[in-house]
Amino acid sequence: MPLSLYNTLSRRKEEFVPLDPSKVRLYCCGPTVYNYAHIGNLRTYIFEDVLRRTLKFNGYNVEHVMNITDVGHMTSDADSGDDKMETAARREQKSPWEIARFYEEAFFTDTDRLNIERPEVTPRATEHVVEMIELIQRLEANGYVYVTTEGVYFDTAKFPDYGKMAGLNLAAQQTTRDEVVTDETKRNASDFMLWFLNKPTHLMQWESPWGPGYPGWHIECSAMSMKYLGETFDIHCGGVDHITVHHTNEIAQSECATHHPFVKYWLHGEFLLIKKRDEDGELVEEKLSKSKGGSINTVQSLIDAGYHPLAYRYFCLQAHYRSELTFSTDALDAATSGLRKVYALCPDNDPLRDDEAAFASARTRVLNALNDDLAMPQAVGLLNSYGSYRLWVEFDAVLGLDIAKRSCRPEEELPADVLQLIEERNAARKSKNWAASDSLRNDLIALGYEVGDGPQGTTVKKHAL
């Protein structure tokens, strides 16, 4: 079946037809590099990586752009609060530039660990201020902006389609948006900042036709995406939290500057949730963020807790990108166990090895699942049901689990400490000391071994994870 994707703009699945048959132009909102990315953020990047890989699997060339936000993203995601870069600079007693480069490198280290392919272009906001100023000037010339003592605003009342993707009621929004109004001359609650002024203590400033200041978060993505992908391009991705503010504002400013559609397909990934107890002691689910999630909320904390990053990637593939996913160590344990079973497959035990017709039929079913709006749970379920090493390896081009590299490893010679634990466990089992046997089994598992019991006693095999 042809590739179909759920378009947030139309609220339905649509057959994917690129504007240019020779190339798919894809833009994804990148990280704000003021702290380590948490695993909730990274679920979105895994979904976008699956999309990129699926497009390539279907034979498309992909030009993928992902921005690096290193100025202008306020703590509210709108225009109120502090610049996240400035907040981090104060927290760590470094310059915003030092903060940005450090956490940008950390972000790409994490995405590499998760086998997330790097985009072709990763522009930094601070290196594209000229393009942002030029885009604001186009909006000004078209009559969509006004200037106050606080900055240059986009006048949403002049764009009748404002909020069309989010289904916003603009009249109601004027009084219901929860934000701290910092400029009393702001005309409408939904108006948003294109260029901040009157911030003399802000550490990152540029000259502009309106005075020294810095760009708003929303204008950054429009300016950078259009520079590298054109004024209309195929796909724009991000998290569902971007729909009502960030992406709504991107559409408004871009289409008012160019007078034609900005993006053809909009795709959004759902939240990663965690369970917490509320003040009444009841378990509730809430969005995972940098400040929430307990001891495991970054890739490094996953590793420190004994989990492989690819087990987290496999865990994310268990849910559709448009469905919420609840994170727990139990779920991550189950994903780890499931992935180890995949790595245990080899060509010699492939049930479809000698049946080309059955393999072709199975391949079609898995591909149809992928092409049905990236239905990864169905695709993974089919792959598990077939148990075909060859099938897993072929679709690993989309899964990104390093199956060929991690499967069918030759048996390694066991180190002396492991042999000693095996000997002690065999002795414990012979004397029916089951408590000691279980304890020694756990010790072997902690060292990264699968433990079984055969006719010759304890058997162990090194995990691929």
Image (tube, grey):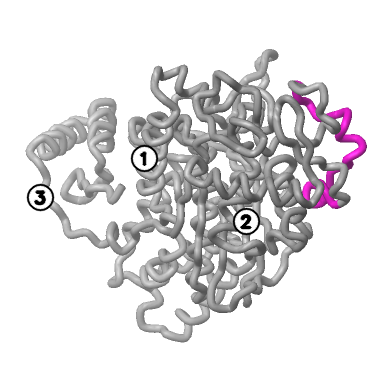
Inspect the magenta stretch and tell me whether residue 387 lies in it: no
Which residue is denoted by mark 3 in the rendering?
413
Q: Is residue 13 left or right of residue 431?
A: right
- Choose between 165 and 366: the one closer to the eye: 165
Which residue is denoted by mark 2 in the rendering?
236
Q: Earlier in the sequence, mark 2 or mark 1?
A: 1
Magenta stretch: give its range: 161-180
The local secondary structure at tag 3 comes to loop
Cα separation, mark 2 vs mark 3, equals 50 Å
- Choose between 400 and 78: the one closer to the eye: 78
The answer to whether any part of residue 62 appears in the image is: yes
- Please say if 359 is above or below 287: below
Q: Earlier in the sequence, mark 2 or mark 3?
A: 2
Cα separation, mark 2 vs mark 1, equals 24 Å
Which residue is denoted by mark 1 in the rendering?
105
Q: Earlier in the sequence, mark 3 or mark 1?
A: 1
Mark 2 closeness class: few <14, some 14–19, many ≥20 residues within 10 Å: many
Where does residue 277 sit, x and y in percent of width and height? 62, 20
Depth check, mark 2 against mark 3: the one in front is 2
Depth check, mark 3 against mark 1: the one in front is 1
Q: Residue, x 50% and y 67% (percent of image)?
A: 62
Residue 197 location, quadrant: top right
